[in-house]
């Protein structure tokens, strides 16, 4: 990010710039650093965040054995309006980061999976078994809320009661 911002500021220090100019410089830096897939641009991602209102809640529903999860997104509303179904219209590019209770690592904040703005539901594989919790949005690096199925919430509660420093 700093590298892209620095080149952007140096390029436009005595002139005018547009939003897309910043996105282009950030894309180049992210591609060079390997933090963004080459087929993806910062503009593509940021347009879903800057050109529509709100932000998503990501819902994680794990399979019975726990090793996979269905992940969905919808617009977060503190209080849903009756007879309102327009949350289907709002979708974002969401960088999904996660770790599990079998080998917790909260330091790897690079997106493991990008949820596209065209996707309502995706499946994530290779999660820990049902006896171990998972946590998404490590260090709150993404601007989204996360909700889990009841079993995972209970595993998180037990971990917090047993040794909260793990989380």
Image (spheres, helix red, strand yellow):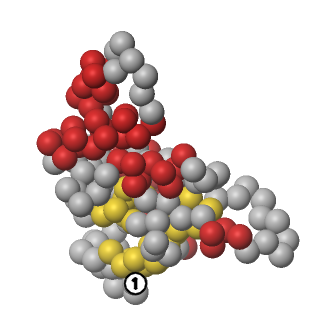
Furthest toward the top, the residue is 14
Residue nearest the observer in this picture, 97 or 16: 16
Q: Residue at the location (39% across, 66% down)?
A: 115
| Residue 151 shows in the view | no
Name the quadrant containing residue 22: top left
Name the quadrant containing residue 83: bottom right
Secondary-structure class at tag 1:
loop
Q: In the image, 53: left or right of 62? A: right
Q: Residue at the location (64% across, 51% down)?
A: 53
Q: In the image, 82: left or right of 164? A: right
Q: Find residue 1 and report its horizontal and vertical position in percent.
A: 29, 33
> Which residue is label 1 attached to?
63
Eyeballing the image, is 18 above or below 166? above
| Residue 144 shows in the view | yes
Residue nearest the observer in this picture, 77 or 21: 21
Q: Find residue 117 and report its horizontal and vertical position in percent.
A: 46, 66
Q: In the image, 66: left or right of 88? A: left
Residue nearest the observer in this picture, 30 or 152: 30
Q: Find residue 155 and report its horizontal and vertical position in percent.
A: 44, 66
Q: Residue at the location (27% across, 31% down)?
A: 4
Q: Residue at the location (77% across, 64% down)?
A: 80
């Amino acid at each position: 990010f700093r590298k892209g911002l620095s080149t952007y500021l140096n390029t436009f220090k005595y002139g005018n710039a547009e939003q897309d100019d910043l996105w282009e410089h950030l894309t180049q830096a992210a591609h060079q650093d390997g933090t963004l897939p080459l087929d993806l641009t910062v503009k593509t991602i940021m347009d879903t965040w800057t050109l529509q209102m709100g932000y998503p809640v990501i819902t994680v529903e794990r399979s019975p054995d726990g090793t996979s999860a269905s992940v969905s997104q919808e617009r977060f509303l503190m209080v849903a309006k009756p007879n309102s179904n327009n949350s289907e219209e709002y979708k974002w590019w969401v960088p999904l980061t996660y770790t599990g209770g079998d080998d917790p690592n909260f330091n790897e904040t690079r997106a493991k999976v990008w949820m596209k703005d065209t996707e309502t539901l995706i499946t994530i594989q290779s999660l820990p078994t049902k006896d171990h919790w998972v946590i998404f949005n490590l260090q709150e690096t993404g601007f989204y809320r996360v909700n889990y199925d009841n079993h995972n919430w209970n595993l998180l509660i037990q971990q917090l009661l047993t040794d909260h420093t793990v989380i």
